[in-house]
Amino acid sequence: MKALNVIESAYRGTLEEQDDTIVWLTHALKGAGAEIDVLLRGNAVNYIVAGQKVTGLSFGTRTQKHAPDIVGDIKGLIGKGVAVYYIAEDASERGLADGDMIPGVNSVGRLALALLYDGYNQVWNW
């Protein structure tokens, strides 16, 4: 079975857990031998913008010492052989160009989504 994780709800739990729950789940599933890929859409396209750093975050006297590294997590997925796609129009609507993205990600247009989905047995939307 081949599955596609579609991530649209961005930054869910990243402060509490220091990672995105579904990106973490994808790592775990891939590590267990699953055939799984990722499609980033909506605000989640921001996960693959190169050069991001989360530092200096504090709430009153509490400082967040273990900031999330979503870009690093996505690079790790790519290193494990997970194909990472993003919707080109969603990136464009947020002022992002292909050159802003980390290497190894694949752009797909909204009109081509049906063809992408057709390559998977299951599509999970988060």
Image (cartoon, rainbow, N blue to C red):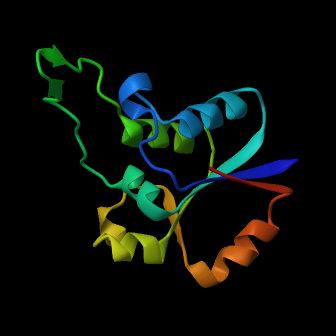
Question: Is 69 positioned to the left or the right of 78 in the image?
Answer: left
For image coordinates 42% across by 59% down, the residue present is 43
Where does residue 77 sit, x and y in percent of width and height? 55, 40
Question: Is 105 positioned to the left or the right of 96 in the image?
Answer: right
Question: Is 99 positioned to the left or the right of 85 in the image?
Answer: left
Query: Does residue 102 appear in the picture of this structure?
Result: no
Q: Which corner quadrant of the image does residue 29 belong to? A: top right
Where does residue 3 sit, x and y in percent of width and height? 77, 50
For image coordinates 40% across by 33% down, the residue present is 14
Residue sitting nearer the eye, 82 or 118: 118
For image coordinates 58% across by 39% down, the residue present is 22
Query: Does residue 66 appear in the picture of this structure?
Result: yes
Where does residue 49 sit, x and y in percent of width and height? 33, 55
Q: Which corner quadrant of the image does residue 99 belong to? A: bottom left
Residue sitting nearer the eye, 107 or 63: 63
The residue lying furthest to the front in this view is: 60
Q: Is residue 51 above or below residue 64?
A: below
Q: Is residue 60 above or below residue 122?
A: above
Where does residue 124 sit, x and y in percent of width and height? 72, 52
For image coordinates 17% across by 15% down, the residue present is 62
Q: How many marks?
A: 0
Q: Which corner quadrant of the image does residue 114 belong to? A: bottom right
